[in-house]
Amino acid sequence: MSESKKGFDLAAVLGSVSKSDTASRQIVDIDIDRIKPDPRNFYRVDKEGVEELAGNIELVGLQQPVLLREEGDGYVVISGHRRMAALQRLVKEGKEQFRRVPSIIEAPDELPELTELKLIFANSGTRRLTDPELAEQTKRCTELFYALQQKGVEFPGRMRDHVAEAVKVSRTKINTLNVIETKLREDLKLRWQKGEISTDGAYNLARMPEVLQKMAAEQKGKLAVSGYVTGKVLDHAEDYLRAKVHRKGCDGCTNGMRFAEHDFHVRNSWEMCCGTECCMSCYKVCSFRCPAAAEQKKKEKAEQRQRKKAEEAKNEADRRENTARTRAVWSRIAPGAKTRGLTVQEVLQKTRNGSPWKCNGIERILADPEAKADNYLHGDLVDVVEDVATVARLTGCSADYICGLTDDPAPAAVRPEPKMGDGGWFDGSVKPPVKELSAVLILETGRFATTAKLADWRNGKWRFAGSNDTIEAPVRWWIPKPEEAKDA
């Protein structure tokens, strides 16, 4: 090297390291206390890996000697830091047979930078390096190449290509690691080195302005510094940092940094607003909204409380009204039903309103004067009865006439009593106590539809008047035609 430093051949110089551990080199046993690690070694020596390697060495012995260089009155490890850590562990456990370390003493290079490059070259081929280790390796390689260059060694082509060849990674990867190494905040870089931040996340953070990096450094969760979230924040960095000229309901928006803080705090990436949303129109509830939106949301919330209060008051008034209506109607129906042996539920079933919850509500109101009706009880049967009563009062007709149960519009109070029975109209389930008679039937033709027909009672069946055809439709009510009944 002293004769000519021109035409540097990286592969030729560093390639010799692959031969340095072969059997052709003399192996000597060195006392473990005379060997120390290289302070420039930046490769990770994990505890679990050392424990596993120590177990293998104890079982089969050290299969590959360590590579050392002389320094002072001792030796420094060039290659084999993990093996040395495993041997030290065994000796510490009292296994003195491992005190003498099989070693190869590397001849000193004319340039010390080449010795360190050989260490890096050896480890890059035998270790599975993490990205932080690759970054440190790349950084150190670059420093060593420039140091060699200052000493007169010429490197044809780009320096980055030589570094990539030495560390065996792509130039794109080197560029990514270089950006992280030179532009990422130290506290974030430390978290990246500990594995708390992915390389994608660290690369995105390194390209952010310092104010956003500082904001990210204050976040503790992993999602805030994930590759996806940091990528979205990076894409919208300008939206966070510049004041918005137009916002819904605002002359100008200066809430950008709070948008960024919001996006770093989200629990799910889809919740990010990216500085492009407006708090005035955002449906989400968060503590990062702008003052104008916070005031607007406060006003809307107060209005909502007022509306809810008014709605509750109206519902309560409706409940009181429905309770009174239900109690008034059923206090008339229930006694008559009871005299005929019918329960409230049976009456409801016969009117096709036999839902159990209605029955329970009506029975509760009739049994307890303080009970309140549920709002749904005002419909169906209650409204029908009230409507009939209203029409009867307005027209002066009987309720029976309005319901189609009689052709006589006169109210019951002024209508002469029929000759058969005390109640006038008979329930459809009641059979005439005579063999033959002519009557008016109220037939059920649908759920809420009825019709009146003239009919004859003969041979135990209702037949259409003047015909032998039986009537199949359910008979709800019947009343004999005056002076038509025939005794048995």
Image (cartoon, rainbow, N blue to C red):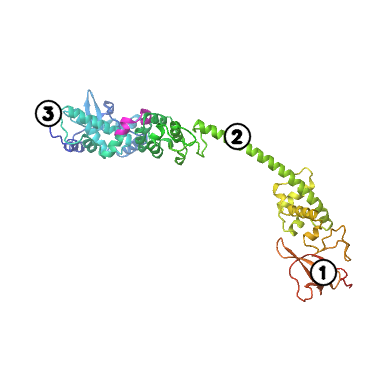
Q: Earlier in the sequence, mark 3 or mark 1?
A: 3
Judge whether 413 appears above or below 301 on screen. Answer: below
Query: Which residue is disc 3 drawn over?
Result: 2
Identify which amino acid the numbered label 3 is placed on. Ser
Q: Residues within 10 Å of mark 2 (few under 14, many from 20)?
A: few
Q: Residues within 10 Å of mark 3 (few under 14, many from 20)?
A: few
Task: Locate residue 85 relative to residue 161 in the image: left or right.
Answer: right
Magenta region: which residues? 178-190
Distance of label 1 from label 2 (alpha carbons): 67 Å
Quadrant holding the N terminus? top left
Q: Residue 439 carries which label?
A: 1
Q: Position of residue 305 (x, y in %)?
A: 62, 36
Q: Which of marks 1 and 2 is nearer the N terminus?
A: 2
Identify which amino acid the numbered label 1 is placed on. Ala
Closer to us: mark 2 or mark 3? 2
Q: Which mark is residue 95?
A: none
Q: Which SS class for mark 1?
A: strand
Quadrant holding the C terminus? bottom right
